[in-house]
Amino acid sequence: MSETLWTVAAHAQAGAEINTQGIIGFFLSKIAPILLAILGLIFIARSNKGEVSRVLTSSTIAIIGIAFIAGAVVLVAVGSGLVDILFSSED
């Protein structure tokens, strides 16, 4: 793991660009569905034990967490546009 981090740091210093869109795409296409499936299995197992109120609470917390993450992404997208508009230099 440390070798990978040093390799990334060396490429960053050499002027190479890191493909952040590829990293985000990989996370969204591979890791996020697995995490959601595991979360769903936990909820199903809990509800089978009769802990429906805990499942509803956990589901609500998960949905609110996803909403916060989506809001942060929108804020970054809209924020960069607003900064470009407000602080654009007029020639």
Image (cartoon, rainbow, N blue to C red):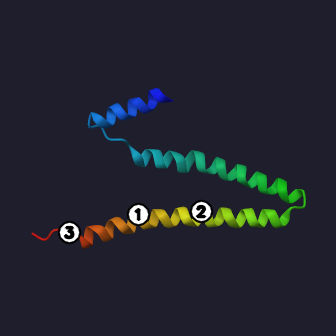
| Percent position of residue 47, x then y | 85, 60
The CA distance from mark 1 to mark 3 is 18 Å
Q: Callout 3: few (<14), some (14-19), or many (20+) C-alpha neighbours within 10 Å? A: few
| Three-letter code for the amino acid on which mark 1 is drawn | Val
Residue drawn at x 90%, y 56% as measured from the top left: 49
The CA distance from mark 2 to mark 1 is 16 Å
Element under label 2? helix
Residue drawn at x 75%, y 66% as measured from the top left: 57
Q: Indicate which disc residue 76 carries.
A: 1
Element under label 1? helix
Instruction: Identify the residue at the far top of this view.
Output: 3
| Percent position of residue 21, x then y | 41, 49
Is mark 1 in CB contact (under 8 Å) with mark 3? Answer: no
Q: What residue would you read off at disc 3? A: 88
The CA distance from mark 2 to mark 3 is 33 Å
| Three-letter code for the amino acid on which mark 3 is drawn | Ser
Q: What residue would you read off at disc 2? A: 66
Looking at marks 2 and 1 on the same chain, the residue that comes earlier in the sequence is marked by 2
- Compared with 90, 5 (above or below) is above
Q: Is residue 82 left or right of residue 26?
A: left
| Percent position of residue 55, x then y | 79, 62
Element under label 3? loop
Residue drawn at x 41%, y 63% as measured from the top left: 76
Q: What is the number of callouts on the image? A: 3
Residue 88 is drawn in which quadrant? bottom left
